[in-house]
Image: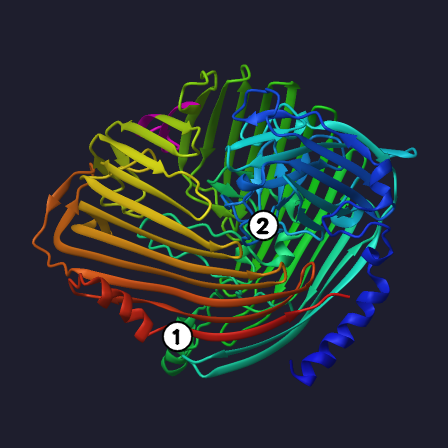
Amino acid sequence: MTSGMVIFRTIFLIPTLLFSSFLFSTIEVDGKLDEEEWRSAQEISKFYQVGPFTLEEPEQKTVVKVYETEDGLYVGYINYQPAETMRSQQHERDADNANADKVGLTVDFDGDALMAYSFTVSLGGSLWDAVYRNENEQKKDWDADWVAKTSIGDDVWFAEFFIPWTVAPMKVQEGDLRKIRISFWRMSLEISKAFATIKSNPTRSRFISTLNDLYVKNFDSSSLDFFPYVTASSERTSDDNDVKTGAEIFWKIDSGSQLNIAINPDFGQVESDDVVINFSAMETFYSDKRPFFSENQSMFDVDGYRFLYVINTRRIGGSPDYNCSDYSSELEALCSSNQKGNTDINLAFRYTKVGQNYDLGFLGAIESDEVFSEGRDYFATRYRVKKENLSFGYLGTFTKNEVLSRNANVNTVDMVYRPTEDFRLYALLLNSIVEENKGYGLRLSISKQINHHLSTGLGFYYLDKDLDINDMGYLIRNDWIMLGGRTELHKTDFNDASKTLMRTYQHSYGCRALSNGDKEGCFTGFEIKNQFKDTSQVEVEVFFRTNGRDNLITRGSELAPYIKLPQNYGIDFKYVGQKNKFWQWDLFAQRSKGSERSSALGWRNKYYSSLKVFPLPNLTLRFSYSHEKDANWLNWIQDNHLGTYEKTQRNTNFSIKYFKGNQHELRVKAQLVAFNAKNPQAQIASINGKLTESSVNLDPFSIGQLAFQIRYRYEFMPLAYLYAVYTRGGKIYELDEEDDLGTLYKRPWEEPSKDNFTVKVRYRF
């Protein structure tokens, strides 16, 4: 280590040693549970089997100890389990389906069943956290300030948590005791079973409202965290070297109030998005992994499943808007050649207040001006009233765009109503005002847990043609009506001789139309999922979609407002192999015309397989490959001109993840896509949606797209990191029939649009 690095760490470490609350705790979080305080801690040992959902007595004993101080909540786990069945593979934070045993807790700090926070540690010491709202809607972008450690004994393993009271906003409660609601759970991978202290799990329609009451001392909490950062980056494709500095301030004023401020924040990517090739009229949605917009953001999360998000924070700091045609010819060319992919941000802030019967929040961000562009301004206001079984809220957003001379207002009202323990109603009303255009929308969702094994739900959307929330939000499409539902039956009563552990039957159905009632089509699907006792799994799904219309593909052409499409149907098969200690694999095959969500002209065959290898507890290798071939792929060219192609798409993904303890993480990740469209035939669409072959010449084309990243991360302390990241990637589009996989993968590597090395230090005082 260099002398400069030693000085740097020493300077930053002194205030941490002086002011860290962890050092004043009587319990050292080391995963051993050997302190005297654990002897007097509250003890919980009544668990139920909730996965598969039988509510039987668990076959593995678990003891949980709970101890609170003025700093936070300590939780200890004693997990009895044969040593040869333990799985301790380390993984990235928030990674699902890790090859590891896990324990965790879900806490509703306000006790009102509106929001809960989940904390999980796997046997290898890796962390996972998430926020739950609307009973079981999960968001994993939230990364909080908490710690957990594990240790292994003789046929037993231990876990120790510390959850500070400052980890989340909490409404003020009167009296000496605070009522929270909590659940403790455990997942044993070898037997593929989960146990919990409540009679529910996150896959069921009721989850956070089933948490058990727990009374703790009513401490008032406050904290002030200062996160300065320095980022140095070098972009070789443009010979651009940049050094940025800035800071974030997280001030928890009291138990229920919090103010976050980011000054000249660095929202550069130390994470890489998945590679997606999208020729549809619908925008791809990407979640936000930037710390400022994932911490304490859940109050502003108002959405309509995956179809709409009232606030999409990826808009903030996104690509600048340009009006290059407003300049002279010389400056117009300069404007076009100097467009940036992201906008810097001068200031971002968020204030939230959680009250006894209400919540209040404000969010804002001001982008900086760029050459040939002016930054946008974003603002949002949130207010929510809470009662015992009802919450009623308002979320409004405002976006000011000087370049496009455009102001956009969005107003929404949302409601969650739980009249009984097994029934829930969610409603969302939307109104957008963009210049002189006003649009309206509605989402209704009901869910009913009929009994322990049977549940059903129904959803309805109405989004008129003038609804537009995309300035600050995300709307997959407007001018749309959709009615759909799903019913699930879980069967668990198999005898001891059966190889099946659980079987799930699922029936889905729905119809879609334009907002004026013109039908797009209806669909129905049936899925059977069989989970075996050896941890392997088989899934089979069939679907049918009536003939209908694609109203989006021609992008609103007056000559052809839609395309008529035939009946679609298909079958999917998926096999997930046994979860071995050193390797896992799965296989997927599909033959279909279209899908439940979209229609197609011809048959599509798709194959997918992945393999994970765990040579060491701290090393994971993963490889996956998919091959998709569409014999009659329909692609829009312009206006009412389209083309049919023989399309082939091949995706290759490879990753290496290495961990040294829980502070050092090295990841190598490569995603490659080879896309080929050949044998084109031009088509002309008529006013009534029929396609006719045209003599217009169309060229075949191929695409090679690459995202490669090597990332090292060192964690100084929770939420404080050193990153060293090398990123290389790009997308090459050629008018040819190139089909060689090596050539298509090599093109973007040899001609990258991004070749960047970045070092970032984010520290914490």
Instruction: Say which of 88 and 764 sits in front.
Output: 88
Q: Residue at (39%, 77%) from the top-left corner?
A: 337
Q: What stretch is highlighted in magenta?
A: 502-526
Q: Residue at (85%, 63%) from the top-left corner?
A: 19
The image shows residue 390 at horizontal and vertical percentages of 69, 26
* Mark toward the start of the polypeptide (2 vs 1): 2
Looking at this view, name the residue that lies furthest to the left.
Answer: 695
The image shows residue 307 at horizontal and vertical percentages of 46, 40
Magenta span includes 594: no
Which mark is drawn over residue 141? 2
Image position of 745 with respect to 598: above or below: below
> As drawn, is 705 to the left or to the right of 155?
left
- At label 1, the amino acid type is Ser
The image shows residue 327 at horizontal and vertical percentages of 42, 76
Instruction: Say which of 400 and 304 sits in front.
Output: 304
Image position of 520 with respect to 330: above or below: above
- Quarter that holds the C terminus: bottom right
Q: Name the residue under label 1.
A: 336
The image quadrant that residue 452 belongs to is: top right
> As drawn, is 64 to the left or to the right of 99?
right
Q: How crowded is mark 2: few (under 14 residues within 10 Å), some or many (20 or more)?
A: many
Secondary element under disc 1, as helix, strand or loop, is: helix
Q: Residues within 10 Å of mark 1 (few under 14, many from 20)?
A: some
Cα distance between the residues tagged 2 and 1: 35 Å
Secondary element under disc 2, as helix, strand or loop, is: loop
Which mark is drawn over residue 239? none
Is residue 638 visible to us here?
Answer: no
Is residue 748 visible to us here?
Answer: yes
- At label 2, the amino acid type is Asp
